Amino acid sequence: MSRIPKLPTTLSKENRPGLLNRPLGRTLANGLSDADKKNLLINHTRPMRGGSTTATTGVAAPRLKRAATAPSSSIAPKVTKVEKKAPAPKIPPYDYKARFNDLLEKHKAMKSDFTDLKEKHVEVSDDYEKIKETVQSCTSERDILKDKLLNSLNDLRTKVTEYEKIKVDFEIQKLENEDLQRKTKLLDDVTTSLRQKSTELDIIQAEFDALTRRHNSLKEETEALRVLTEQLKKISIEYDKLKLDYKEAQESITKYKSDSEALQNILASMYKEQRDLRNTIQDLKGNIRVYCRIRPPLESELTKPLFNLNVLDACSIEVEKIELLNSARKCKPQSFTFDGIFTPHASQEDVFTEVSAMVQSALDGYNVCIFAYGQTGSGKTYTMEGGCGTEQYGIIPRAFNMIFTCMEDLKRMGWELTIKASFLEIYNEVIYDLLNSSKDQESHEIKMVNSKGIDVYVSNLKEEEVKSSHDFIRLMIFAQRNRQTAATLNNERSSRSHSVAQIKISAINEKRKERYTSNLNLVDLAGSESGKTTQRMDETKHINRSLSELSKVILSLQTNQSHIPYRNSKLTHLLMPSLGGNSKTLMLVNINQFDECFSETLNSLRFATKVNNCRVVKAKKNLSMVET
Ligand SMILES: Nc1ncnc2c1ncn2[C@@H]1O[C@H](COP(=O)(O)OP(=O)(O)OP(=O)(O)O)[C@@H](O)[C@H]1O
């Protein structure tokens, strides 16, 4: 629509007749209309008065030009103006001369006018020719314009036709567009519903996927079930076979059971025999056994001077300190004999191999006491408790491991064992519970279990039942920590106190109606050296007293005295059940080889010899029948 060009206003309906219908020949065909030509002739023939030729020519030319385009009516009034000139003065008729002169004048004037007119005529003719040319060019221009106009009209007609066509096309397009819009709306509706359907489809697809997965897993389960069913069938066949085998086995078991019982009885009697034999050998060896352990120097002590120490054989050593007196060598080697010597190279395991017989005795129902004796730093704690790692374990943790290993064997023979442990410390004749970490402990007294026997217990002492060696190690570490804390609070207390680990074994054999109890006391004695400060003197007094009471008790036992002075010190009183006739004792005397420790080493060796010379009467097992 907008593409159709607008027709020019000059070609509007009103203008068209003027241009198209009026014949151009009437106005411009010959340059001037007939009226104009007439006027022109009048002007040319009329005499010009007083006016210059240039003025006349100057006016006439534009008039002629105007006449070529303007209507003829505009030229006429100018001709009238020329006719209204003022009349000339009258000459009397008699004056022929004047009249002649006047005529001469007039002739002259007319002659000049004629000349002017002739010139003007030439000019006008030129103008006329020019105008004619102009008219001709205008005519050709008009023709060109007419052609152009006709062409434009044709174009216009074509355009109008095209416009009409376009209009029709537009109407068609409009209709089509409306149709399209309707269709688009319809399509939108369809798209919306399609989207909904697509969402629904997605949900259905997800459900379908889930169902497919479920189906697949069910398929797998079904397959697995099928396999299981097949296996079940096989198992069922095997089960039937096994049932038969089981029946046969049950019969065999019944037979084996009776055989096993017979064998168990044989084993029990053999175990009893073995135990009796073992203890007979120990009785023969002596119920107080003394071993000497020589501590190796530590890396930091390698430069320390040593005294002479010779290991003579498995049981004897010789010690000697070279002293120069007035340049004469004064030396006196002294030899000592014990049940065994552990050289500096002996491992913890080597020591325990010898000691284990004593632990076995405790398991057999005997009271046993193992104690380590020696000066501070001689290796008592290392021997009894040990260092870090199982290889460094000392006698106490190894004894416990052994008890728990043997417990299993005893269980097979019908023995049920209950193990209880307590840890205590005797410092300056006062007992401290090492399983109780509180500072203000209740006082602990040693009391008799009953009026008959010699068994004792410590009041207010914590006693823990131990179910595994791990439990025991935990308790031992707890006790060690408590001892160390006390040592920090009370300078060097750990070296100046006796530490005792008590293990109580209760065994019962319901089948054989037998029971026994035994005590295993593992003692790390206080350093045996003499103190140098007042505080140390006080401690030493207590230590020396308890150690001398220990030797007195052992001597009294050796000489079969009717009265054994157990109660003179807390240590001997506590160890009473383990030192008496019904017990086995093992002492480890720890020494080191440093020159500076020579006299203390001699003291320790002498004390150990005293104990070693003592032979306790034959030990008795604490066996009793279970009361029914
Ligand atoms: N047989 C040994 N092999 C290696 N090191 C040892 C041995 N005996 C003792 N030691 C080490 O020597 C040092 C002193 O030993 P320990 O503490 O056992 O002596 P102690 O007699 O118990 O002293 P205290 O009376 O002060 O408790 C420790 O570092 C210990 O590890």
Image (spheres, rainbow, N blue to C red):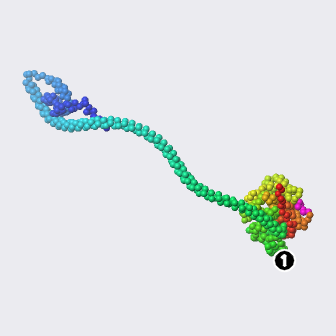
Inspect this view and state whether residue 92 appears. yes
The answer to whether 493 appears left or right of 134 in the picture is right
Look at the image and say whether residue 569 sits in the magenta stretch: yes
- Find disc 1 in the rendering and name its residue: 329
User: In which quadrant of the rendered view does residue 26 lie?
Assistant: top left
Which quadrant of the figure contains the N terminus?
top left
* Between 224 and 308, the one nearer to me in the picture: 224
* Between 286 and 55, the one nearer to me in the picture: 286
Residue 11 drawn above or below residue 384: above
The x and y percentages for residue 438 are 79, 53
Residue 166 drawn above or below residue 492: above
Q: Residue furthest right?
A: 562
Looking at numbered disc 1 in the image, what kind of residue is underneath it? Arg
The answer to whether 244 appears left or right of 62 in the picture is right
| Numbered marks: total | 1
User: In which quadrant of the rendered view does residue 343 lie?
Assistant: bottom right
Secondary structure at numbered mark 1: strand
Ligand 1 under 8 Å from disc 1 Cβ: no
Which quadrant of the figure contains the C terminus?
bottom right
Inspect this view and state whether residue 482 appears. no
Residues shaded magenta: 563-570
Residue located 43% across and 39% down the image: 190
Residue located 14% across and 35% down the image: 125
The x and y percentages for residue 143 are 20, 37
The x and y percentages for residue 134 are 19, 36
